[in-house]
Image (cartoon, rainbow, N blue to C red):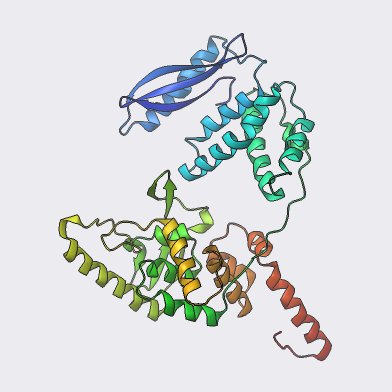
């Protein structure tokens, strides 16, 4: 919304309501619930249009934000506004950071948006550096920047002071650990027959994110063309695991070829699921997941991580993070001579710089090969 009043859609008793945010003369935030008149089912677009109309009507009545708004109140407004704009898991992460760190700090300072300066933000960053990493503080800065940008666009603040605020130098991420090809072979033997064998096999074979492997459904597996498509994920919402038709980024949506061996492996998985359906009958949850428990239900992401660590420890392999299997796939592909661009596309990174930053250790090793090659005129892998 481009004016001074902001709002969002909420559902109450099956109907959409416009919840508009106003600040009274006392500087306190007020919410007004105004019915759009539209039932929830099938009317989101109509309700959104009505929300805009309601806000325009209120602005026409010359209702304005009071300039005594506190900065923490703006943060709450932004948090509420993001609820309908981002994935549920993303919103939940924003909410955790805001409510655990940023909002309490600025509620304690009581600084108003009209008085906010870069040094207020810098003081926050310095205070948090005692317990948080520079990378984490940069994420906090990104949230604060977005909140102020939201305030600027809605004419709550004139400028985004976060643009001029100092932030601690970011620390380049390094891949902590990864498995060699020989260790991957050992892991494949160790997971055979385990309850999380299928998701681990997909992560090993493709370097999939955990959410991508668990969100894979059979309609994304094309046996005829020998292709597999990543187009959805699963997300944790409270205690539930939910299917999401969204991926981490647009680049994460990708179609990759299947080897003959993987085709046969997945056909075996499908055959096993048919046997499970007959075994469980009406109790089987036929949700079409490739990675499914024996009764057809989606496998909880946390269980995959826990089981992987137990399997690694029991088999004598180094105990690394589950996400390091993704790093293992990338590191081994780069070591085999595939280009950074090829690996970036394979992994579904939004930008090749992400791949370059994460796997800089591989490029450092290749520089040794370059030095040797220039010295003796031949290439010998280090």
Is any part of residue 104 visible from this angle?
yes
> Residue 75: x, y in percent?
61, 29
Is any part of residue 224 visible from this angle?
no
**What residue is drawn where x is 50% and y is 72%?**
313
> In which quadrant is the N terminus drawn?
top right
309 or 61, which is in the foreground?
309
Number of callouts:
0
283 to 164, vertically: above or below: below
> Residue 41: x, y in percent?
30, 33
44 or 275, which is in the foreground?
275
> Residue 222: x, y in percent?
34, 68
139 to 183, vertically: above or below: above
Side of 81 relative to 291 (left or right) = right
Can you tell which quarter of the image residue 327 is in? bottom right
> Residue 25: x, y in percent?
61, 8
65 or 168, which is in the foreground?
168
Side of 270 relative to 10 (left or right) = left
17 to 229, vertically: above or below: above
**What residue is drawn where x is 73% and y is 35%?**
124
Instruction: Give the residue at the far front of this rendering.
Output: 314
**What residue is drawn where x is 72% and y is 77%?**
366
**What residue is drawn where x is 35% and y is 76%?**
265
> In which quadrant is the C terminus drawn?
bottom right
Side of 183 relative to 69 (left or right) = left
Can you tell which quarter of the image residue 293 is in? bottom left
52 to 218, vertically: above or below: above
146 or 89, which is in the foreground?
89
């Amino acid at each position: 919304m481009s004016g001074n009043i902001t709002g969002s859609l909420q559902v109450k008793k099956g109907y959409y309501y416009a919840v508009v945010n106003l600040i009274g003369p006392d500087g306190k935030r007020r919410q007004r619930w105004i019915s759009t008149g539209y039932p929830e089912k099938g009317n989101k677009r109509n309700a959104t249009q009505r929300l805009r109309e309601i806000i325009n009507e209120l602005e026409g009545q010359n209702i304005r934000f009071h300039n005594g708004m506190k900065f923490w109140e703006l943060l709450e407004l932004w948090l509420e506004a993001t609820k309908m704009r981002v994935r549920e898991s993303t919103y939940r992460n924003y909410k955790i950071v805001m409510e655990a760190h940023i909002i309490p700090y600025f509620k304690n300072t009581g600084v108003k948006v009209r008085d906010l300066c870069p040094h207020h933000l810098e003081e926050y960053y310095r205070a948090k550096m005692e317990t948080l990493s520079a990378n984490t503080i940069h994420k906090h800065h990104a949230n604060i920047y977005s909140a102020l940008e939201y305030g600027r666009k809605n004419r709550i603040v004139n400028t985004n002071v976060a643009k001029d605020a100092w932030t601690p130098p970011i620390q380049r991420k390094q891949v902590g650990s990864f498995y060699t090809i020989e260790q991957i072979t050992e892991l494949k033997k160790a997971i055979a027959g385990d309850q999380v064998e299928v998701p681990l096999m997909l992560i090993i074979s493709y370097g999939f994110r955990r959410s991508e492997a668990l969100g894979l459904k059979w309609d994304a597996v094309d046996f005829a063309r020998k292709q597999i498509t990543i187009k959805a994920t699963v997300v944790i919402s409270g205690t539930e695991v939910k299917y999401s038709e969204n991926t981490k980024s647009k680049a994460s949506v990708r179609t990759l070829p299947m080897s003959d061996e993987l085709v046969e492996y997945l056909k075996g998985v499908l055959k096993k699921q048919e046997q499970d359906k007959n075994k469980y009958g009406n109790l089987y949850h036929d949700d079409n997941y490739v990675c499914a428990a024996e009764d057809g239900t989606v496998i909880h992401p946390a269980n995959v991580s826990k089981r992987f660590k137990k399997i690694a420890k029991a088999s004598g392999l180094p105990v690394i993070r589950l996400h390091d299997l993704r790093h293992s796939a990338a590191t081994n592909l780069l070591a085999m001579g595939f280009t950074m661009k090829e690996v970036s596309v394979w992994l579904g990174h939004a930008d090749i710089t992400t791949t370059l930053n994460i796997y800089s250790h591989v490029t450092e090793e290749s520089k040794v090969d370059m030095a040797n090659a220039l010295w003796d005129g031949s290439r010998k892998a280090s």
